[in-house]
Amino acid sequence: MQEYEVKRGNTSDLEDRIQTGFASIFAVEPRKKEGHYIISYGSMIRLEVWPGEKNKTVFMDTETDPTVLSMPDAEADKIILDTNKKFRLFLDLVTCFTTKERVKRAKKGVEKNE
């Protein structure tokens, strides 16, 4: 499970962005269970997303599909790369931070804890 910070000023419509991201990026309608949004896509048999306290963060938990990992490399690579690309786009949309900004903030967080 990972927790990602949501960019300040973008917390009020977090749940809308989560649902929009699933529809526009993954082209999948999520199941909703106890405030968590859940889908299966590509190399993930489960991508579970839910807002954190006051929508200031978003939690994501993933589970990899072992059948994809047991495929020949050429087949598996296509699926894994597509899944990874869409997951990163989804993170960008939901958190309102680019990948570069998320990495920078994560490094600051690690340095604070040391």
Image (spheres, rainbow, N blue to C red):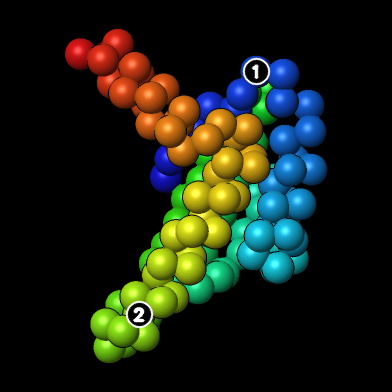
x 48%, y 68%: residue? 82
For disc 1, the neighbor class at 10 Å (few under 14, some 14 to 19, many from 20) is few
Q: Is residue 78 above or below residue 109?
A: below
Per the image, the residue denoted by label 1 is 8
The disc placed on residue 76 is 2
How far is the residue under mark 2 from the one under mark 1?
A: 37 Å
Residue at the outermost left position: 114
Q: Is residue 101 above or below residue 80?
A: above
Instruction: Inspect the image, locate mark 2, and give the three-letter code of the amino acid beneath it.
Output: Ala
Image quadrant containing the C terminus: top left
x 70%, y 68%: residue? 28
Residue 89 lies, in percent from the top left, at: 57, 50
| SS type, badge 2 | helix
Left or right of 20, for residue 45: left
| SS type, badge 1 | loop
Residue 76 lies, in percent from the top left, at: 35, 80
Instruction: Inspect the image, locate mark 1, and give the three-letter code of the amino acid beneath it.
Output: Arg
Q: Is residue 61 above or below residue 72?
A: above
Which residue is more in the foreground, 27 or 101? 101
For disc 2, the neighbor class at 10 Å (few under 14, some 14 to 19, many from 20) is some
Q: Quadrant of residue 92?
A: top right
The disc placed on residue 100 is none
Does residue 70 show up? no
Image quadrant containing the N terminus: top left
Which residue is more in the foreground, 66 or 83? 83
Residue 7 lies, in percent from the top left, at: 61, 24
